[in-house]
Image (cartoon, helix red, strand yellow):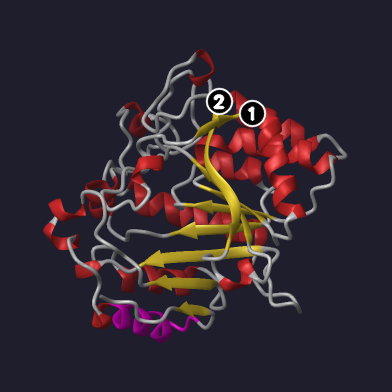
Amino acid sequence: MHRSGELKKRGEALWNRMSPCKLCPRSCGVDRLAGETGFCHAPSDLVISSFHPHYGEEPPLVGRGGSGTVFFSHCGLRCVFCINHETSMGGEGAPATIEELAQMMLRLQERGCHNINVVTPSHYSPHIALALDIAAGQGLRLPLVYNTCGWEQMEILRILDGIVDIYLADFKYWCGEMAAIYSNCAPPDPRFLESEAGARYSATDIYPDLTKMALLEMQRQVGVARPADDGLIYRGLMVRHLVMPNNVGGSPDILRWIAANLPKDTYVNIMSQYRPMYRAHEFPDIARRVTRQEYQQAVDAAQDAGLVNLDIQGFRFF
């Protein structure tokens, strides 16, 4: 895509969607190119929290060299239990240019990382595509991991078709009401629900419905994530689901939906590491860790539904 000029063309198409901004399902409509900021508070310029080889991701992404992770500041969600709220909501990080992002990618490749893993990328997808174009021209050959909350704009995903190699996507909530309460997943602008894109949704079901559509589109683009001979994954869809206390996330329903609508060998990481961080103590239903029984119930639901490629974590309860 770099040699044909298509990658740069796609990056420019994404860039134009910052004015008015329609990069995520909120479709705030602010003119970021004119200095306005919307719900996520991200400016038009990049803000990056950190970049480094990361060894805490899924094993098929980490290998021996680590996953080359770039953590972006700001976020389109407002999870009350966010463990990185200083970055995601406070915007902590350092300004960077697109050229500097390209050099970060190349440095991660030089350090032996197996992929470029962009974390919370949606609001900076234009910058990522343009940086990839620059880096590809200077020798970048690593696959791109799009590490997303799963709540994505379909139009943007279609532009990313052929750019992203691995989608690493969350499916957080089965119930839109829970998504609205705990992650503020409802469009702030009521005009969205009146638009063509939002006509089929209500303010409360927008997270699960859009996430389902996004996962199906991701699967169409990259297929099932299968390890190569070296044990690493270079292409495919990987799904994460964080088990939450009191079944707030609706784990059994999510896992049954995945089994019914995606291939049975879809890579699914059932995560046990929920911690009541940030403002979680204000919400009694999520003010504690998950129990061994709650986690096992999610695993049982996945196995009973026929999912066969599960990343089942050790019980880390305190």
**In the image, residue 209 above or below residue 155:** below
User: Dividing the image into 4 quarters, which one contains the N terminus?
Assistant: top right
Name the residue beneath numbered marker 1.
97
Q: Is 10 on the left or on the right of 212, as rendered?
A: right
Of 170 and 59, nearer the camera is 59
Q: Callout 2, which amino acid?
A: Asp
Q: Which numbered dot is residue 116? A: none
Numbered disc total: 2
User: Dividing the image into 4 quarters, which one contains the C terminus?
Assistant: bottom left
Of 84 and 27, nearer the camera is 84
Spatial CA distance of label 1 from label 2 is 7 Å
Instruction: Estimate how packed mark 2 is, as few (under 14), some (14 to 19) or many (20 or more) residues with alpha carbons within 10 Å.
Output: some
Magenta span covers which residues? 295-307
Where disc 2 sits, the SS reads: loop
Contact flag, marks 1 and 2 (Cβ < 8 Å) = yes
Residue 261 image point, x, y percent: 49, 68
Q: Which numbered dot is residue 45? A: 2
